[in-house]
Amino acid sequence: MAITTWVQAAGTVLLGLVGLWFAHNYRRQIRLKLAERQVESYVRLWALTAPAAPFRATPLEPVELKKLYDDMSKWYFDDGDGILTSAAARDLFVGVHSNLICPIGEMKPAVLAAQLTALSPADAERRRGCAIVRQVSLLRTQLKKDLAMHFGVDYYTGLQPDDRAFLVSCGLSPRRRPWRPRRLRPADRPRVNSCVCGVCPAKALPDAGHPQS
Protein backbone atom coordinates (compact mmCIF):
# COMPACT_ATOMS: atom_id res chain seq x y z
CA MET A 1 0.00 0.00 0.00
CA ALA A 2 2.80 2.42 0.89
CA ILE A 3 4.52 1.83 -2.45
CA THR A 4 1.23 2.28 -4.33
CA THR A 5 0.52 5.51 -2.51
CA TRP A 6 4.02 6.78 -3.23
CA VAL A 7 3.69 5.93 -6.93
CA GLN A 8 0.33 7.70 -7.11
CA ALA A 9 1.75 10.78 -5.39
CA ALA A 10 4.76 10.81 -7.71
CA GLY A 11 2.47 10.43 -10.70
CA THR A 12 0.33 13.33 -9.51
CA VAL A 13 3.39 15.55 -9.04
CA LEU A 14 4.73 14.56 -12.45
CA LEU A 15 1.43 15.33 -14.13
CA GLY A 16 1.35 18.67 -12.34
CA LEU A 17 4.84 19.51 -13.53
CA VAL A 18 3.99 18.52 -17.09
CA GLY A 19 0.86 20.69 -16.91
CA LEU A 20 2.89 23.66 -15.65
CA TRP A 21 5.42 23.18 -18.45
CA PHE A 22 2.70 23.13 -21.10
CA ALA A 23 1.04 26.20 -19.57
CA HIS A 24 4.35 28.08 -19.46
CA ASN A 25 5.18 27.06 -23.02
CA TYR A 26 1.70 28.15 -24.19
CA ARG A 27 2.06 31.56 -22.51
CA ARG A 28 5.54 31.91 -24.01
CA GLN A 29 4.20 31.19 -27.49
CA ILE A 30 1.41 33.75 -26.98
CA ARG A 31 3.94 36.38 -25.84
CA LEU A 32 6.09 35.72 -28.89
CA LYS A 33 3.12 36.08 -31.22
CA LEU A 34 2.04 39.29 -29.50
CA ALA A 35 5.60 40.63 -29.72
CA GLU A 36 5.61 39.98 -33.47
CA ARG A 37 2.27 41.73 -33.84
CA GLN A 38 3.49 44.66 -31.75
CA VAL A 39 6.47 45.16 -34.06
CA GLU A 40 4.20 45.15 -37.11
CA SER A 41 1.79 47.51 -35.37
CA TYR A 42 4.53 49.95 -34.37
CA VAL A 43 5.97 49.93 -37.88
CA ARG A 44 2.59 50.96 -39.27
CA LEU A 45 2.27 53.77 -36.73
CA TRP A 46 5.81 54.92 -37.52
CA ALA A 47 4.97 55.05 -41.22
CA LEU A 48 1.73 56.99 -40.86
CA THR A 49 3.45 59.68 -38.76
CA ALA A 50 5.87 60.43 -41.60
CA PRO A 51 4.21 63.83 -42.32
CA ALA A 52 5.49 64.93 -38.88
CA ALA A 53 9.11 64.03 -39.62
CA PRO A 54 11.54 66.22 -37.64
CA PHE A 55 13.34 67.20 -40.82
CA ARG A 56 10.40 69.02 -42.40
CA ALA A 57 10.98 72.74 -42.90
CA THR A 58 7.42 73.99 -42.29
CA PRO A 59 4.82 73.47 -39.55
CA LEU A 60 2.08 70.94 -40.07
CA GLU A 61 -0.93 72.54 -41.74
CA PRO A 62 -4.45 72.14 -40.26
CA VAL A 63 -5.45 69.78 -43.08
CA GLU A 64 -2.38 67.63 -42.34
CA LEU A 65 -3.19 67.62 -38.63
CA LYS A 66 -6.74 66.44 -39.35
CA LYS A 67 -5.55 63.68 -41.68
CA LEU A 68 -2.98 62.53 -39.15
CA TYR A 69 -5.71 62.52 -36.49
CA ASP A 70 -7.94 60.34 -38.67
CA ASP A 71 -5.09 57.99 -39.61
CA MET A 72 -4.05 57.56 -35.98
CA SER A 73 -7.67 56.93 -34.97
CA LYS A 74 -7.99 54.20 -37.58
CA TRP A 75 -4.70 52.65 -36.45
CA TYR A 76 -5.74 52.63 -32.80
CA PHE A 77 -9.38 51.58 -33.10
CA ASP A 78 -10.34 50.24 -36.54
CA ASP A 79 -7.20 48.13 -36.99
CA GLY A 80 -7.07 47.19 -33.28
CA ASP A 81 -3.40 48.12 -32.94
CA GLY A 82 -3.99 50.24 -29.85
CA ILE A 83 -4.38 47.11 -27.74
CA LEU A 84 -0.74 46.22 -28.42
CA THR A 85 0.80 49.45 -27.15
CA SER A 86 2.68 49.75 -23.89
CA ALA A 87 1.21 51.96 -21.17
CA ALA A 88 3.80 54.67 -21.85
CA ALA A 89 3.26 54.59 -25.62
CA ARG A 90 -0.51 54.68 -25.13
CA ASP A 91 -0.31 57.72 -22.84
CA LEU A 92 1.89 59.57 -25.33
CA PHE A 93 -0.35 58.51 -28.21
CA VAL A 94 -3.44 59.87 -26.46
CA GLY A 95 -1.67 63.16 -25.71
CA VAL A 96 -0.47 63.64 -29.28
CA HIS A 97 -3.73 62.46 -30.81
CA SER A 98 -5.78 64.95 -28.79
CA ASN A 99 -3.41 67.84 -29.49
CA LEU A 100 -3.82 67.41 -33.24
CA ILE A 101 -7.31 68.94 -33.43
CA CYS A 102 -8.42 69.96 -29.93
CA PRO A 103 -9.14 73.63 -29.16
CA ILE A 104 -5.93 75.60 -28.62
CA GLY A 105 -6.76 76.23 -24.96
CA GLU A 106 -7.08 72.48 -24.28
CA MET A 107 -3.70 71.42 -25.63
CA LYS A 108 -1.17 69.59 -23.48
CA PRO A 109 0.83 70.75 -21.65
CA ALA A 110 -1.09 73.58 -20.01
CA VAL A 111 1.92 75.89 -20.28
CA LEU A 112 1.91 75.45 -24.05
CA ALA A 113 -1.84 76.08 -24.22
CA ALA A 114 -1.37 79.32 -22.28
CA GLN A 115 1.37 80.46 -24.65
CA LEU A 116 -0.73 79.66 -27.71
CA THR A 117 -3.87 81.40 -26.47
CA ALA A 118 -1.84 84.59 -26.14
CA LEU A 119 -1.06 84.49 -29.87
CA SER A 120 -3.22 85.42 -32.80
CA PRO A 121 -5.27 82.48 -34.16
CA ALA A 122 -3.01 82.17 -37.21
CA ASP A 123 0.21 82.21 -35.17
CA ALA A 124 -1.29 79.81 -32.63
CA GLU A 125 -2.06 77.28 -35.38
CA ARG A 126 1.44 77.66 -36.81
CA ARG A 127 2.92 77.09 -33.37
CA ARG A 128 0.68 74.02 -32.91
CA GLY A 129 1.95 72.61 -36.20
CA CYS A 130 5.51 73.12 -34.97
CA ALA A 131 4.94 71.64 -31.48
CA ILE A 132 3.21 68.55 -32.91
CA VAL A 133 6.32 67.67 -34.92
CA ARG A 134 8.33 67.44 -31.70
CA GLN A 135 5.58 65.64 -29.78
CA VAL A 136 5.21 62.99 -32.49
CA SER A 137 8.97 62.49 -32.32
CA LEU A 138 8.66 61.87 -28.59
CA LEU A 139 6.06 59.20 -29.36
CA ARG A 140 8.30 57.54 -31.95
CA THR A 141 11.17 57.49 -29.46
CA GLN A 142 8.93 55.62 -27.01
CA LEU A 143 8.06 53.11 -29.74
CA LYS A 144 11.76 52.43 -30.27
CA LYS A 145 12.29 52.06 -26.53
CA ASP A 146 9.44 49.53 -26.31
CA LEU A 147 11.11 47.44 -29.01
CA ALA A 148 14.49 47.60 -27.21
CA MET A 149 15.91 49.62 -30.10
CA HIS A 150 16.69 52.68 -27.99
CA PHE A 151 19.55 52.40 -25.52
CA GLY A 152 19.52 55.81 -23.85
CA VAL A 153 18.54 59.30 -24.80
CA ASP A 154 19.81 60.39 -28.13
CA TYR A 155 16.42 61.79 -29.10
CA TYR A 156 17.52 65.12 -27.68
CA THR A 157 20.83 66.06 -26.24
CA GLY A 158 18.62 68.08 -23.90
CA LEU A 159 14.83 68.12 -23.64
CA GLN A 160 13.22 71.49 -24.18
CA PRO A 161 10.88 72.92 -21.50
CA ASP A 162 7.78 72.21 -23.61
CA ASP A 163 8.96 68.64 -24.19
CA ARG A 164 9.43 68.00 -20.48
CA ALA A 165 6.07 69.54 -19.66
CA PHE A 166 4.38 67.42 -22.34
CA LEU A 167 5.90 64.21 -20.97
CA VAL A 168 4.76 65.11 -17.45
CA SER A 169 1.26 65.95 -18.71
CA CYS A 170 1.15 62.43 -20.20
CA GLY A 171 2.16 60.88 -16.88
CA LEU A 172 5.79 60.17 -17.83
CA SER A 173 8.96 61.22 -16.04
CA PRO A 174 11.55 63.08 -18.16
CA ARG A 175 14.19 61.83 -15.70
CA ARG A 176 13.79 58.20 -16.73
CA ARG A 177 14.87 56.35 -19.83
CA PRO A 178 14.65 56.99 -22.69
CA TRP A 179 14.45 60.66 -21.74
CA ARG A 180 17.48 60.86 -19.47
CA PRO A 181 20.12 62.96 -21.24
CA ARG A 182 23.06 61.34 -22.96
CA ARG A 183 25.88 63.57 -24.14
CA LEU A 184 26.66 63.46 -27.84
CA ARG A 185 29.76 64.73 -29.53
CA PRO A 186 29.00 67.90 -31.55
CA ALA A 187 29.78 66.08 -34.80
CA ASP A 188 27.14 63.44 -33.94
CA ARG A 189 24.34 65.92 -33.42
CA PRO A 190 21.76 65.89 -36.21
CA ARG A 191 21.13 69.23 -37.88
CA VAL A 192 17.43 69.71 -37.22
CA ASN A 193 15.65 73.02 -36.81
CA SER A 194 13.88 72.95 -33.44
CA CYS A 195 11.39 75.59 -34.59
CA VAL A 196 9.88 75.76 -38.05
CA CYS A 197 7.02 78.14 -37.22
CA GLY A 198 8.99 81.22 -36.22
CA VAL A 199 6.85 81.88 -33.13
CA CYS A 200 8.39 79.48 -30.58
CA PRO A 201 9.78 81.24 -27.49
CA ALA A 202 13.54 81.66 -27.78
CA LYS A 203 14.10 80.23 -24.30
CA ALA A 204 12.50 76.95 -25.44
CA LEU A 205 15.03 76.48 -28.21
CA PRO A 206 18.43 75.70 -26.67
CA ASP A 207 21.17 74.72 -29.08
CA ALA A 208 21.32 71.32 -27.41
CA GLY A 209 17.78 70.34 -28.31
CA HIS A 210 17.71 68.28 -31.49
CA PRO A 211 15.12 65.61 -32.32
CA GLN A 212 16.27 62.36 -33.90
CA SER A 213 13.14 60.27 -34.28
Image: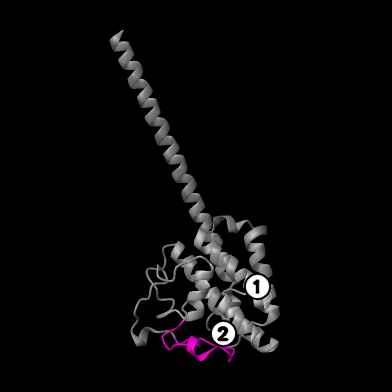
SS class, disc 2 = loop
Residue at (57% x, 80% y) in the render: 112
Nearest the eye: 141 or 29: 141
For mark 2, what is the residue? 56
Q: Is residue 90 above or below residue 53?
A: above
Nearest the eye: 126 or 4: 126
Residue 204 within the magenta-colored segment of the rendering: yes
**Residue 23, percent across and down?**
45, 37
Nearest the eye: 171 or 132: 171
Q: Residue 68 carries which label?
A: 1
Amino acid carrying mark 1 in the image:
Leu
* Range of magenta residues: 191-210
**Residue 33, percent across and down?**
50, 50
**Residue 93, percent across and down?**
57, 66
Q: Is residue 190 shown left or right of residue 183? A: right
Q: Which of marks 1 and 2 is nearer the N terminus?
A: 2
